[in-house]
Image: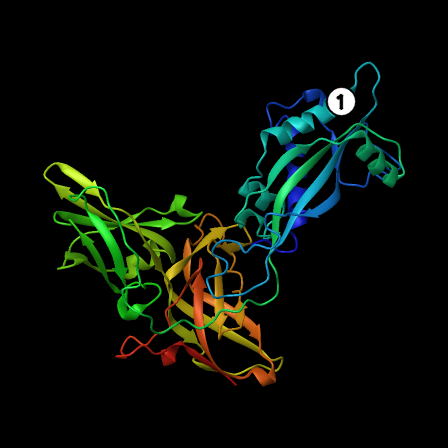
Amino acid sequence: MSNTRAIAAVTATIRGLIERGFDPAKDPNSDPELQGTAVTMQPPDEARGSNPPDKQINIYLYQILPNLAYRNSDLPRQLRPGETGQPPLALNLYYLLTAYAIDDAQPVSHRILGRAMSVLHDHPVLGRREIEAALPNTGVSEQFERIRLSLQPMALEDIFKLWSGFQTHYRLSAAYEATVVLIDSTRPTSAPLPVLQRGEEDQGNSSIAGVSLPVLDTIRLPKGQSSASLGDELNIEGRNLDGLIAVRFALISSRANGFTPVSLVAPAIALSDKGVKITLPDDAAAQTAWLSGFYTVTAIVQRGQQTWSSNELPLSIGPTITQIQPGNVVARDANGDVSLTLTCTPEVRLARVDDQHMRFDQTVVLLLGSGRQIAPKAPPAPPASPAPAPKSTNTLDFVFHVEPNEVGTYLIRLRVDGVDSVPLDPQSEIPQFADDQKLQVT
């Protein structure tokens, strides 16, 4: 999600696109005669200044309106059923492009405006790398909706009102809309504790076409958990699974382009009376090959020379907190702050921003009890070139403030890409929370 620098990031990205459009060294389609055109971001009444350039294009954000589609809506995978939170601040931005030049034998200002409009026409969607390059660490490049640009026709009455408000003479201009900017709310989200038990056989009827095709009916998780963890044993109930050769796990994520689906084969999978038993790997290779998130599960069956794929079932694989430092009992410092370092599996994917900054390439948050969500500190800077930047990390640092009346014992959960860690005691016969997943703040 985007932070409060999101509006500035969109403006800076638009300016960067237009600047490259007037530079022949960066854009072969640019007009060499327009090289050196100044790109400014001033109010129209101050755009020319005391020493105006000969060629100029001015970008001005003249209006901000709420986006009606997301005004009162929660973004997908930001809130789970039963949780409450403040919707994001959803905004549409309106920009005015005004061209200035000395028009003698040729209307140079018309050529400047035409070139700028051509650049924006060829970039109707702002790229993630373009936004990060213009203003890094704003979150706009990772928001669920992409930023789209569209030309906004303006009636003569609207033009008159707009330029009268600037109290300056009208100049040839074009208006553009940038939608949608989603600024995350800073208010806390309520995340209720997970349910330990629920009824069995709570599923509806299913229908299939054909009786010989492989069919998966349901996935049974150990102890009725809401999500699986690496090392868990899953039971998948299904039919017509004779000839099973593999079970494929495909990640459902906006970052899935860089994730190769994982296929498990024997001995990690084995046929049972009702379907398939699967043991998720938990070795060092799995901790980097797998990611926390939402998956689809498909069975691959081979009969003779023919290979069949079953239907897909959803599965969420969550992180596991393996270590808490300095321990499960931690004291507030003189300022009332608490510092924690969590070790988790699988590792959290990282992305390199520039030579000085790294960022998490997955959404990470620590749930403290049922009322607080805490974001981690930024990852350390990447090593000096030519050393490669790390692709993932299993260490997360958190610093948060605790008032004196808030000291006590909290159940902690780690949420990565919308999937929570399972805080259950694996050795208990009945579902109960594990002591090593609790944090006592003193």
Q: Residue furthest top?
A: 105
Residue depicted at 26% across the width and 48% down the height: 207
Q: Work out whether residue 272 or residue 113 is closer to the camera in this orientation and state it.
A: 272
* Display colour scheme: rainbow
Residue depicted at 37% across the width and 62% down the height: 318
| Numbered circles on residues, count | 1
Considering the image in quadrants, where does the N terminus appear?
bottom right
Image side of residue 353 versus residue 150, left or right: left
Residue under numbered circle 1: 110
Residue depicted at 42% across the width and 79% down the height: 438
Q: Work out whether residue 307 or residue 285 is closer to the camera in this orientation and state it.
A: 307
Q: Is residue 230 above or below residue 64?
A: below
Q: Residue furthest front?
A: 205
Q: Is residue 388 above or below residue 126?
A: below
Residue 230 at what x, y percent from top left?
A: 30, 63
Q: Residues within 10 Å of mark 1 (few under 14, many from 20)?
A: some
For label 1, the SS is: helix
> Disc 1 residue type?
His
Image side of residue 250 versus residue 329, left or right: left
Residue 7 at what x, y percent from top left?
A: 67, 48
Q: Work out whether residue 84 or residue 417 is closer to the camera in this orientation and state it.
A: 84
Residue 62 at what x, y percent from top left?
A: 76, 42
Q: Work out whether residue 253 or residue 141 is closer to the camera in this orientation and state it.
A: 253
Residue 317 at what x, y percent from top left?
A: 35, 60
Q: Quadrant of residue 153?
A: top right
Q: Is residue 110 visible?
A: yes
Q: Is residue 281 visible?
A: no
